[in-house]
């Protein structure tokens, strides 16, 4: 608003001169009467009107006014005018003259002569008071010079001014601008003030240009800074060319100032449009902006490389282009203001300022109005206003940048926190990975050791399996010979022992494989520990006696929670181990109560074990002090494995040469649960009661059927050996009465022995005692829960075990019946 007010004041102050035009004195027929004009009150006066004129003649300054044949209006150019029937051109020379009448004792006066782009000389009452360039009658002897001058008028009431002008340089000849007259003091002070203002304006524009050039170097992405710096330079050059300050500093050819004036006129609108495009890129067409830049560049080249008489003829054309570009710029800024762009309204106001001063100067130069040159004021306001626009944008940019920096700092802090968290998580994961790697390394080491142990295991198993097989081979040969001699009883006993050893070894290997595979599932229940131990000690009493050892067992009435089969295998292996490694002395089995635990102890007076070998003895195929000791070396390994499965604590204490003590600790059952424990069933049937027993044996292997038929027949049984369920049913239907016992293999073609037993019971109509024979150690008695009076025997089946099982099964069946 302040800028607009300043411009309006300047504009209307210049327009006020129009309103006074009818009341001021004017030159009439070459005479100006100033007798009643008071300069101190009414101000300066323009010497406008009809001057005496003589075309193509340089009149004598001391001559009379009657020598001039006609009149010429001032200010005006003589181009295409007619004088005395002759059409005048821009090039030529002439003499102007007027008579000025003044009052007595009037104040001293000065003339203000504008730049005219030509040469002139001025006389007052015959004395030369001012000159610019060299006045001549041809282009060869005429030297133009465009320089504003101040001339002092003589102190006289009647002054005759004679002005000689020659123009062979510019397209226009004559006096294009008004000559002013005013009091000397006022003219001199205004001249100095104008000079100071121009110098200040040019200096300010240079400083602004350098400032924004530096900003552009620091922020090359801001093209507006560069455009603004170029605008400031062009404005400064324009002011410099119009003010004619260079003439006060250094003498130079007039063509330089003229070219500079036109070049700035061509380039200013195009550069300004590019500047507006940098502010509002969506409102200004890129193609139009660069097209105007091309036109301005062409105009510059035209000005630089053609004579003044040629390039000055293009002023009107380029003035029209300037007007078009300014109108387009105003439209673009209006559109930006309508769309709410930042600073668009302020830029629109500044464009209004520039438009007013530009239109004023254009009309002034084209002789359409009489005014003052507002360009320097308009340029100063215009360039300062846009500095405010850029400053506001820069301030907002800095605010946004600071806000962005703050947000970036907050984000960096947050990112640092997240990085620390991620680093911590990564460290934990790295630690976990390291632990996993350590565990993997340990597992790899365990796997390597297991592989080595497995290799050792297989090597030992291969060796130990070959031993009984080799013995069997020898015994078979001996049996053939003894049969011929009739002495086969001792050999058959040895064969049976070898088979027992082979069966034990195979059973140990199966147990080891089950332990390693983790498929052995114990069946834990409450049992009478005394009954279990009594049966086991009875088995080893004869073996210990044959070796001459004192073998004793202390009876117990304790009840414990365990798996009967697995605990029996543990105790058998420990007792067997004690007897093997005791050559003389005794072996003692007893129990100790320890709070809610029962500790089974096996003492011996054997070789003993060194402290270095205590752990090694529990490894597979490992034996210490192996002199005169046979066995697979798996017993203690299996005992430890079973103890771990059952949760029983297996320990050993030993002294080399004094003996050892192996102990197994079990959970004791309280008295409240004694009633729930069933007493073991004892067989009451004698072994010779198997004669005339009707037995159906089912197995899909003909060799096994033949061997079993022979064995049972030898015991006095009547045997029907068949391959499957269909044959068994047919056989039972052929019998006079149902069989007393059914023996059945578990794995038959397409069905199991349990299914066959169930089907046969349905056919017979009631349950017949049965025995399932299988090599599957995982088949436990719980699998027979749906079949009453049925037992399981595991292959290979010892004949004595089979006979005892049959006797006990039939006895139990008889009691239940």
Image (spheres, rainbow, N blue to C red):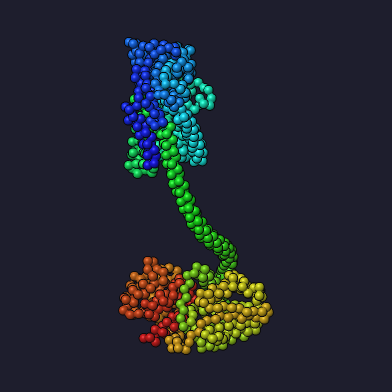
Q: From this viewpoint, which residue is outermost toward the right? A: 657
Quarter of the image where one finds residue 70 = top left
Q: Which residue is nearer to you in this view: 107 or 302?
A: 107
Q: Quadrant of the N terminus?
A: top left
Percent from the top left, x then y, of residue 404? 46, 50
Image position of 176 (left or right of 466): left
In the image, what residue occupies the spot 43% across and 77% down?
781
| Image side of residue 192 versus residue 757, left or right | right
Residue 171 appears in the picture as rendered:
no
Give above or below for 507 relative to 397.
below
Residue depicted at x 35% and y 40%: 336
Measured along the vertical axis of the image, is residue 610 above or below residue 261?
below
Is residue 255 or residue 82 the one in the foreground? Answer: 82
Which x, y percent locates residue 513? 51, 68
- Quadrant of image for the C terminus: bottom left
Residue 386, given in percent of the width and then of the height, sits at: 42, 39
Seen as rendered, the residue at the extreme front is 104
Residue for point 52% across, 81% down: 666
């Amino acid at each position: 608003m302040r800028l607009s007010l300043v411009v309006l004041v300047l504009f209307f102050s210049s327009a006020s001169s129009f309103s006074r035009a009818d009341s001021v004195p004017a030159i009439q027929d070459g005479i100006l009467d100033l007798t009643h004009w008071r300069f101190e009150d009414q101000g300066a006066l323009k010497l406008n009107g009809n001057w005496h004129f003589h075309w193509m003649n340089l009149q004598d300054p001391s001559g009379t006014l009657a020598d001039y044949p006609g009149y010429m209006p001032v200010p005006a150019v003589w181009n295409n005018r007619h004088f005395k029937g002759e059409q005048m051109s821009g090039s030529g020379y002439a003499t102007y003259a007027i008579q000025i009448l003044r009052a007595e004792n009037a104040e001293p006066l000065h003339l203000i002569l504008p730049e005219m782009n030509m040469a002139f000389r001025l006389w007052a009452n015959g004395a030369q008071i001012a000159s610019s360039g060299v006045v001549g009658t041809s282009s060869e002897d005429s030297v133009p010079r465009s320089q504003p001058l101040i001339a002092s008028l003589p102190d006289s009431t009647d002054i005759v001014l004679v002005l000689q002008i020659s123009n062979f340089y510019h397209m226009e000849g004559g006096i294009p601008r008004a000559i002013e007259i005013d009091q000397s003091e006022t003219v001199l002070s205004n001249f100095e003030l104008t000079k100071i203002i121009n110098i200040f304006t040019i200096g300010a524009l240079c400083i602004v240009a350098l400032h924004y050039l530096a900003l552009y170097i620091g922020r090359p992405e801001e093209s507006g800074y560069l455009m603004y710096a170029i605008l400031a330079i062009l404005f400064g050059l324009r002011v410099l060319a119009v003010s004619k300050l260079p003439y006060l500093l250094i003498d130079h050819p007039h063509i330089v100032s003229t070219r500079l004036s036109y070049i700035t006129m061509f380039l200013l609108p195009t550069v300004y449009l590019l500047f507006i495009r940098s502010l509002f890129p969506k409102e200004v067409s890129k193609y139009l902006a660069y097209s105007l830049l091309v036109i301005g560049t062409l105009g510059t080249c035209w000005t630089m490389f053609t004579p003044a008489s040629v390039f000055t003829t293009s002023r009107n054309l380029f003035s029209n282009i300037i007007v078009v570009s300014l109108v387009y710029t105003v439209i673009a800024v209006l559109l930006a203001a309508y769309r709410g762009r930042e600073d668009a309204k302020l830029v629109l106001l500044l464009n209004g300022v520039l438009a007013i001063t530009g239109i004023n100067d254009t009309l002034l130069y084209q002789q359409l109005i009489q005014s003052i040159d507002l360009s320097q004021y308009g340029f100063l306001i215009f360039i300062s206003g846009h500095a405010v626009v850029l400053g506001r944008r820069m301030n907002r940019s800095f605010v946004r940048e600071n806000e962005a920096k703050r947000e970036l700092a907050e984000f960096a802090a947050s990112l640092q926190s997240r990085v620390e968290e991620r680093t911590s998580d990564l460290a934990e994961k790295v630690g976990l990975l390291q632990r996993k790697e350590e565990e993997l390394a340990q597992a790899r080491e365990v796997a390597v050791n297991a592989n080595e142990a497995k290799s050792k295991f297989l090597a030992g198993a291969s060796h130990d399996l070959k031993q009984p097989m080799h013995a069997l081979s020898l015994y078979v040969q001996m049996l053939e010979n003894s049969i011929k001699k009739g002495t086969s009883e001792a050999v058959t006993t040895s064969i049976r022992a070898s088979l027992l050893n082979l069966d034990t070894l195979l059973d140990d290997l199966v147990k080891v494989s089950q332990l390693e595979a983790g498929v052995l599932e114990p069946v834990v229940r409450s049992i009478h520990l005394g009954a279990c131990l009594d049966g086991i000690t009875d088995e080893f009493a004869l073996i210990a006696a044959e070796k001459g050892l004192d073998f004793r067992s202390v009876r117990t009435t304790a009840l414990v929670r365990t798996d009967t089969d697995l605990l029996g295998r543990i105790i058998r292996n420990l007792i067997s181990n004690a007897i093997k490694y005791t050559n003389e002395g005794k072996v003692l089995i007893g129990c100790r109560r320890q709070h809610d635990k029962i500790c089974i102890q096996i003492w011996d007076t054997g070789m003993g074990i060194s402290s270095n070998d205590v752990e090694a003895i529990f490894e597979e195929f490992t034996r210490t002090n192996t002199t005169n000791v046979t066995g697979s070396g798996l017993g203690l390994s299996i005992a430890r494995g079973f103890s771990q499965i059952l949760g029983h604590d297996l320990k050993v204490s030993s002294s080399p040469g004094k003996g050892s003590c192996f102990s197994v600790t079990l959970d004791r059952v309280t008295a409240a649960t004694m009633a729930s424990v069933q007493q073991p069933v004892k067989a009451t049937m004698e072994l010779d009661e198997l004669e005339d027993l009707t037995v159906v044996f089912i197995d899909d292997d003909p060799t096994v059927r033949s061997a079993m038929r022979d064995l049972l027949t030898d015991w006095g049984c009547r045997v029907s050996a068949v391959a499957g369920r269909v044959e068994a049913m047919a056989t039972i239907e052929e019998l006079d009465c149902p069989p007393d016992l059914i023996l059945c293999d578990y794995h038959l073609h397409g069905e199991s022995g349990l299914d066959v037993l169930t089907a046969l019971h349905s056919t017979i109509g009631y349950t017949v005692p049965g025995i399932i024979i299988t090599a599957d150690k995982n088949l436990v008695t719980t699998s027979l829960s749906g079949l009453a009076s049925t037992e399981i025997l595991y292959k290979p089946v010892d004949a004595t075990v089979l006979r005892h099982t049959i006797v006990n099964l039939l006895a139990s069946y008889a009691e239940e019946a």
